[in-house]
Structure formats: structure tokens, C-alpha cells
Image: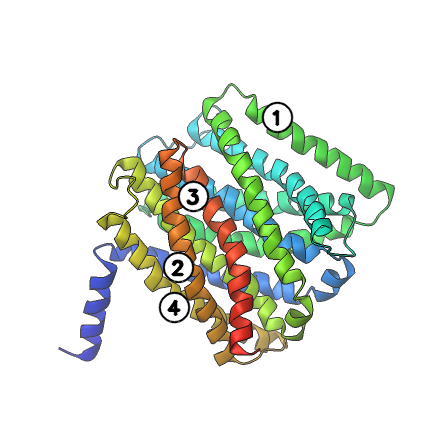
Amino acid sequence: MSLLTLVMARLRALLGPDTGGVRQSLVALGLSTVAMISGGVFLASATDTLEDLPGLLLLVPAAIALRGNVFGALGSRLGTAITMGTFTLSRRLDTVVGQNIVGAVGLSLGLSVAAALLAKVVAVIFSISPTMGTDDFIVVSVVGGMLASFIVLGITLVLSAGSVRFGWNLDNVTAPLVTGVGDVVTLPSLLVAAWLTRRGSFTAALAVVLAVFGVLAVIAMIRSALPELHRIAIESFPILCVAVVLDLVAGITVEKRLDQFAEFESLLILLPGYFGAAGSLGGILSSRLATKFHLGVIAPSPVPAKAARLDIRTIFLLSIPVFAFTAILAHLAALIFGFASPGILEMISIAVLGGIVATMFLIAVAYYGTLAAVRMGFDPDTYGMPVVTSTLDFVGAFTLILAIVLVGV
């Protein structure tokens, strides 16, 4: 038996029987990484805009994560609905799918307003000065966020229909692909929305209208007679607001290092991919765990059961090649587009070193966050993705900066 055969046999043994699910995850993660690096190129090419609109970089992680949190949770809920046989595509809003769509759009609108207001508050608290005005934050967050949201919604529904048609496991593909698409479309959407800022009374009036619509959308969902829509609003809005705050703190960490990132633009290219890879891995894990909790395959125990341990081991093994691939793509993109890079070995070292630490956190947060949701009687599909991605953005910012320092860049 050849060495390659032995290695492959050992790898299959480590990954367990779900090699099909691993392949689906790898393909989805690969496509997602390419998409997120494309988003990073947009970010690296927008350094002038970031400097002209102080505070915009503070909003970027929250805006990107919000798309992943809202629509990743939507995909997770639809994946569970497919598994349990309650999924049907229909134009009616009172169906499970209809209520989930309305809930996702309404949450995206309301939380974009909340993200803008919280961004301004956080900037004041952490002495980030100067920053855009509150009206500028609202316009950029809501207009850019909603442009991105409708695109991500379409992709999520296509993935859901494809999972029914082709037998994909939505838990394996939703988190990475939604995160990747969210990165690609959110950054350009924010830059497009930035054209509407600093236009005096027009920007101020537009901000007021958008804020009113956002508040009314959340109130309407909370007071809705549709049970699924009401539950989504009640359970999602508080935890997503907490997630936004954590993402904004991550943005502060990056905003204060803007000079360092501007020196090596490849780090700006890496940034969305690094956050997205961690969030995607955590999203896959939380989605798989949520479905197994729903089906009773695993019990809500402080010690992970065998099925849960297999998922945890798989995610950890996937993390190393995913972070390395992300770094390689970021370095190559920097070379292609003429941006500065500290070197491919340094980029890989930064991404893998920081990524391994982040993965350890994401495993703990994904399992025990899902466990807490189940024990408190909440839907783990609704809570899993936001808790994981927001925590990882918060932790990921520090692990990335720590890795940059340790590598000596």
C-alpha cells in the first residue's frame, strides 16, 4: 500500500463516515474564500474612501456580519425545514418559507438602522475621532445593507431550492456561501451608498426616512399575527443587536490599525476572508449541531456526544487548509492588482496561526451557544449563526492582530 493511500485512509478515518458532507463543505468553503478575497480587493482599493469617510471601516465588519447572521440563520432554519419535510416554495407569506423571508428582510432593515446608531455611539465611547455624522452612518448602513440583502436573499433561496433538487445538505453549504456572497456584495454596496453621504439636507432627510422605516419594520414583525414571523423577530432582534456591538468592537480594533493595514494592502484583502472563513466554519458547525438537536440525534449535554465530536473534529481539520488557502489567495490577489504584501510565507503564517486560535474559540462557542439555546427553549437555528459569527469577529480581530505581531509584520 502506497504512502498516499495510507494518508488518504487515515484522513477518511479522522473525518468519519460523512465524507460527502466534507466534500460539500470544502467546495462551498473554497468558493466562499474566492468570493471573500474579491471583497478584500474592493476593500484594499478603497483606502482613499476609508480615509475620506472616517468610521466607515468601523462599520464594515458589522455590515458584512449582519448579512451572514440574518441570512445564514435563514438558511439554517430552511435547512431544518427541509430535513423535517416542512419546506415548500410559495408566494404566500403565511407559509414557513414566506414568513422566514419577510423576517429576514425586516430584520436586515431594522438592524441596519441599529448598526448605524450603535456605530456612532461606539465611536464616541472608544474615542474614535473624527467620524462621519449620524445621518451618514444611517444612509451608508441602510442603503448599502439593503442592496446587499436582496442579492444574498436570492442566493439563499437558490441554495435552498438546489438542496431539495440535488440533495445537498444545506447545513454544509449555506454558511460559507452566504458569507462569501455577503462579503462580495456588501463592500461595494457600502461604497455605492457612500455617494449619498455629506449632501446636506438631502442626506439628513433620507436618514430620517430610512430610520422610520426600519423602526416600523421591526414593530410590525413583533406585533405580527403570523407565529413564525413573530417568533423570529422576538428571538432574533435582541441577540443580533448584541452581535452588532461585538462586530463594531472588532471594527474598532481594525480601524485603529488602519495605518498598518494601509502599508500592506494584502492584509486588507485578507481581512474579509479571514473573518469569513472563521464565521463559515463556525456556521457550518452550529447549523449541523442545531439540526441534530432538532432531530434528537444528540442530547443537550455539557460533554459533546460522539456525533457532535465528529462534527467538531471535522471543522478543526478543515480549518488549517481553509485559512492557508485564504492567505495564498490574498497574497496572489495583492500581486495581481499591484498591492504590497509582506510575503506569502508571512501571510500563511498569520492566517493559519490566528485561524487555529480562532477555530478553538469557534468550536466552544458553536457547541455551547447552541446547547444554551436548546436548554432555554430557543430555536438553535436562530441563535447559532449570530452568536458564532459575532463572537468570532470579535475574537478574530484580536487573533489576527496577535498573529501579525507574532509574525513580526
Report if the CB atoms under discs 3 and 2 are less than 8 Å apart: no
Compared across the picture, whether 115 is left or right of 132 comes to left
Residue 151 seen in the current view: no
Report if the CB atoms under discs 3 and 4 are less than 8 Å apart: no
Residue 313 is situated, as x and y percent measured from the top left of the image, at 29, 58
Residue at image x 86%, y 45%? 200
Pointer 1 residue? 219
Residue at image x 46%, y 59%? 277
Pointer 2 residue? 360
Q: Nearer the viewer, mark 2 or mark 4?
A: 2
Report if the CB atoms under discs 1 and 4 are less than 8 Å apart: no
Residue 223 is situated, as x and y percent measured from the top left of the image, at 56, 21
Residue 236 seen in the current view: yes
Q: Nearer the viewer, residue 279 or 24?
A: 279
Q: Nearer the viewer, mark 3 or mark 4?
A: 3
Quote the CA–CA distance across marks 3 and 4: 24 Å
Which label is found at residue 384?
3
Above or below, 252 relative to 245: below
Q: Amino acid at mark 1?
A: Ile
Residue 196 is situated, as x and y percent measured from the top left of the image, at 77, 48
Pointer 4 residue? 321
Compared across the picture, whether 119 is left or right of 204 comes to left
Q: Amino acid at mark 3?
A: Gly
The quarter in which the N terminus is drawn is bottom left
Secondary structure of the residue carrying numbered label 3 = helix
Quote the CA–CA distance across marks 3 and 2: 16 Å
Q: Earlier in the sequence, mark 1 or mark 4?
A: 1
Q: Nearer the viewer, residue 389 or 253?
A: 253
Q: Nearer the viewer, residue 403 or 205?
A: 403
Q: Amino acid at mark 2?
A: Met
